[in-house]
Image: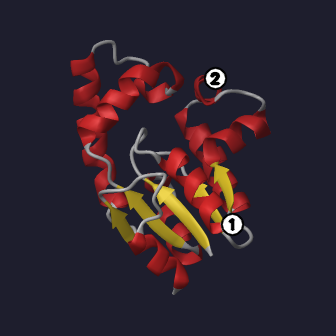
Amino acid sequence: MVVYLIGMPGAGKTTCGMAWARSMGYKFYDMDVFIEALHGQSIPALFEASGEAQFREIERRVLHQISQGANRIIATGGGTPCFFDNMAFMKETGLVVFLDCPLESIIQRLWHGRAQRPLLKECDTEEHLRRFVLELYEKRRPFYEQAHLRLHQYDPNTFPAALRSAVRQ
């Protein structure tokens, strides 16, 4: 089975995905890390050099590439489900899990790591970041809510029972 973790930037897709893959004996793929290795550039550099439209096309190709095979957890980019037919593709080829982290937690996490995130480079105050995150969440929520499973409370050290049950089916 392929498990796709979706959600806002800073929701914990990579942290949880690595831990959960290890506990299940699955392979783990972080789409951003894979894209950076493939193109030899950081996501911000690639985003700036290519533009968002080209980056989203690269992201789409990588999604199709790394989803081949079984027993893997894939941490997608926050915007991955919102472009092209990515959400439909993920739903057809695996289990899509929405990590629905409280927005205040996301804002705190992103404030400290915003330099590494191309969409956040203009957020120079925490209030500006808060408005941006709330607006982005509202745009992306309709896509995220199409997931097979939505987790509100999760921890990388504890494999969620709902996810365990869904993976066994």
Q: In which quadrant of the rendered view does residue 125 lie?
A: top left
Residue 45 is tagged as: 2
In the rendered image, residue 162, in percent from the top left (x then y), is placed at 39, 73
Q: Is residue 50 above or below residue 17?
A: above
Point out the image quarter for the N terminus.
bottom right
- The residue shown at (38%, 17%) is 122
Q: Is residue 100 above or below residue 96?
A: above
Type of the residue with mark 1: Gly
Q: Nearer the viewer, residue 13 or 133?
A: 13
At label 1, counting other C-alpha atoms closer than 10 Å, the crowd grade (few under 14, some 14-19, many 20 or more) is few
Instruction: Say whether residue 83 is left or right of residue 37.
Output: left
In the rendered image, residue 70, in percent from the top left (x then y), is placed at 71, 73
Q: Is residue 95 above or below residue 51?
A: below
Type of the residue with mark 2: Ala
Q: Marks 2 and 1: in contact by CB < 8 Å? A: no
At label 2, counting other C-alpha atoms closer than 10 Å, the crowd grade (few under 14, some 14-19, many 20 or more) is some
State the CA–CA distance, disc 1 to disc 2. Answer: 33 Å
Question: Which coloring applies here?
Answer: secondary structure
Which residue corresponds to mark 1?
Answer: 25
